[in-house]
Image: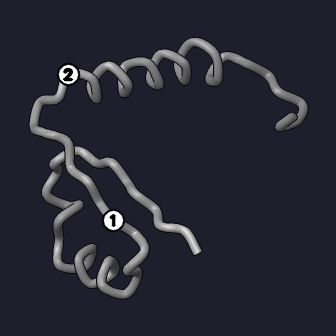
Amino acid sequence: DRDLHVILDNVSSHKSREVQKWLGRHPRVSFHFVPTYSSWLNMVEIFFNLVQSKVVARGTFPSKA
């Protein structure tokens, strides 16, 4: 009973025919595209890259909790 809004960059694969057909079958999902070269999105990608490389990749985790 809820809609899903997905924020994406403007890569062409997000706008492919297959994706558009999938969106047609899932009317509660909406894609929103950020402007090309959006600096805030680049910073978010850098942040998650740092978390993965400095914390996740080097850690030993006995459980997901």
Residue 27 appears at what percent x and percent y?
A: 37, 80
Image point 37% across, 19% down: which residue?
46
Residue 30: give its label.
1
Residue 57 appears at what percent x and percent y?
A: 62, 23
Q: Nearer the viewer, residue 46 or 3?
A: 3
Image point 88% across, 35% down: which residue?
63
Element under disc 2: helix
From what the image shows, is residue 63 above or below residue 39? below
In this image, 65 relative to 39: left or right?
A: right
Quadrant of the drawing holding the N terminus: bottom right
Residue 9 appears at what percent x and percent y?
A: 22, 44
The 10 Å Cα crowd at callout 2, few under 14, some 14 to 19, many 20 or more, is few
Residue 41: image quadrant is top left
Image point 21% across, 50% down: which residue?
33
Residue 57: give its label.
none
Residue 49 appears at what percent x and percent y?
A: 44, 23
Mark closest to the chain's N terminus, 1 or 2: 1
The amino acid beneath tag 2 is Ser
Gap in angstroms between the C-alphas marked 1 and 2: 22 Å
The amino acid beneath tag 1 is Ser
Residue 39: give its label.
2
From what the image shows, is residue 53 above or below residue 26? above
Image point 63% across, 16% down: which residue?
55
From what the image shows, is residue 61 above or below residue 15? above
